Image (cartoon, grey):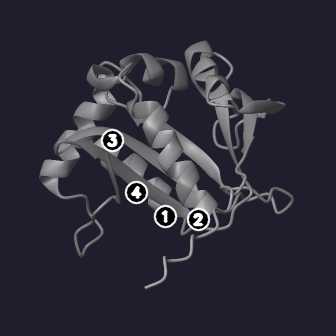
Amino acid sequence: MILAPLPLTPDRDIPAPLLTELTALYAANREFHALSGDFPDPDDVRPEQVAAALADELANPDVEVLLARSTGRLVGIVITLAHHPDPADPDPWIGLLMIDTGAQRHGYGRRLASLVEDRFRAAGRAAVRLAVLDNNPKGLAFWTALGYEAIAHREDRRLGRPCTVLRKPLPSPPHTPRRAAPPG
């Protein structure tokens, strides 16, 4: 799986072919969007809505939108937040991790989460947080299976929806001493 930042045109737009792919990914996740209320009609997700949602995310300089591809096909998207607006919260956040419904249950979500954790670990971050909507038991089961633990219950900052906040420590990988080259 290849993970890469969302490419934008010089005008900060999403290239049209990519926007078509992203719209298909978002539209395929109808069940999630029905739970989240992020789009007015989860049965009719439009390119301009996806572009606006991503532009809103990218307006924050601490946000990164990453695309996951496997054999050239867009299989997922993840949106991260390097610094939470609450100064008492030291951890980065995963704001969204979405896998194309045709690629779900094949390990892509687990792999994508692991790649994001590795990026944060490499940046020296000690843990990562996320929030799962309380009406999304499948999402909660996914994240807890990956080792995330509930640390709080509160409403999300944007729409006031009830959520469970989860956190996962990111210990540094054990240091493996290098072996000396054999003499000679």
Q: Earlier in the sequence, mark 4 or mark 2?
A: 4
Q: Earlier in the sequence, mark 3 or mark 1?
A: 3
- The residue pinned by badge 1 equals 59
Which x, y percent locates residue 166?
A: 73, 35
In front: label 2 or label 1: 2
Q: CA distance from mark 3 to mark 4?
A: 10 Å
Amino acid bearing label 1: Ala
Which x, y percent locates residue 82?
A: 62, 62
Amino acid bearing label 3: Gln
- The residue pinned by badge 4 equals 55
Identify the residue at image location x=58%, y=46%: 94
Instruction: Pick out the residue farthest to the bottom.
Output: 184
Q: Earlier in the sequence, mark 2 or mark 3?
A: 3
Q: CA distance from mark 4 to mark 1?
A: 6 Å
Q: Which dot marks residue 116?
A: none
Image marks 4 and 1: residues in contact by CB distance under 8 Å: yes
Where, quadrant-wise, is the C terminus in this rendering?
bottom left
User: How crowded is the residue under tag 4: few (<14 C-alpha within 10 Å), some, or many (20+)?
Assistant: some
Q: Secondary structure at mark 1?
A: loop
Q: Nearer the viewer, residue 82 or 146?
A: 146
Amino acid bearing label 4: Ala
